[in-house]
Amino acid sequence: MATQAAWETFPHEADVGVRGTGATLAEAFAGAATAMTAAICDPAMVAAREAVAVECVAPEAELLLLDWLNALVFEMATRRMLFSRFEVDIAPEDAGLRLRATAWGEAVDVARHQPAAEVKGASFCELKAGQQPDGRWLAQCVVDV
């Protein structure tokens, strides 16, 4: 049975924290991506119409999280899209960890999405990615808005 990634935002001075949790690291990364969308608009208002592939490699989970979120920021900016659904696969490889993902979303519709902020990038602030004592996985950082 597939479990659902959980997500939330949290306040952080002038920026916004994003946090994802899940039964796997990949679910936590998907949750963090959803939380990043929530820093911009209501993810429920973004239709999963178009798929965009994203791939990242990093030596460790925390750096992979930054690369993942910043890759999504790049895709949002260059394609003028918002994303609401994420399918993430993370696997070990020689260089550390490889993330292969698909993000589904649609073109920004200002009237319908009512974007509240523009995410400029993910930061090292509050950066955590790993398994928690309760066995769940956590992926979080602060994004610059």
Image: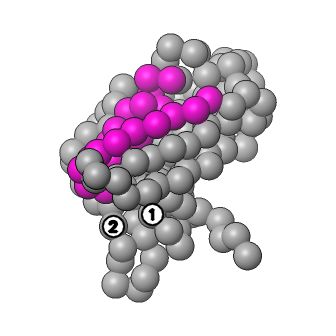
Q: Looking at the image, is 78 positioned above or below residue 90?
A: above
SS for callout 2: strand
Whether label 1 touches label 2, CB < 8 Å: yes
- In the image, what residue occupies the spot 40% across and 65% down? 138
**Residue 85 relative to residue 91: left or right:** right
Query: Tag on residue 130?
Result: 2
Point out residue 58 in the picture as x, y percentages from the top left corner.
Answer: 29, 45
**Residue 3 relative to residue 13: left or right:** right
Colour mode of the rendering: one colour
Which kind of residue does numbered mark 1 sit on? Leu
Q: Looking at the image, is 58 positioned above or below residue 91?
A: above
Query: In which quadrant of the rendered view does residue 92 lie?
Result: bottom left
Point out residue 81 in the picture as x, y percentages from the top left corner.
Answer: 61, 22
Callout count? 2
- In the image, what residue occupies the spot 58% across and 16% down? 80
Mark 1 — residue?
25
- In the image, what residue occupies the spot 65% across and 20% down? 108
Which kind of residue does numbered mark 2 sit on? Gly
Q: Judge whether residue 53 is colored magenta.
A: yes
Residue at the outermost bottom position: 134
Q: Residues within 10 Å of mark 2 (few under 14, many from 20)?
A: some
Q: Judge whether residue 112 is colored magenta.
A: no
* Mark 1 to mark 2 CA distance (whole Å): 7 Å
Query: Can residue 126 be seen here?
Result: yes
- What's the magenta region? 52-75
On the rendered image, what quadrant is the C terminus found in?
Answer: top left
**Residue 107 relative to residue 131: left or right:** right
Query: Tag on residue 39?
Result: none
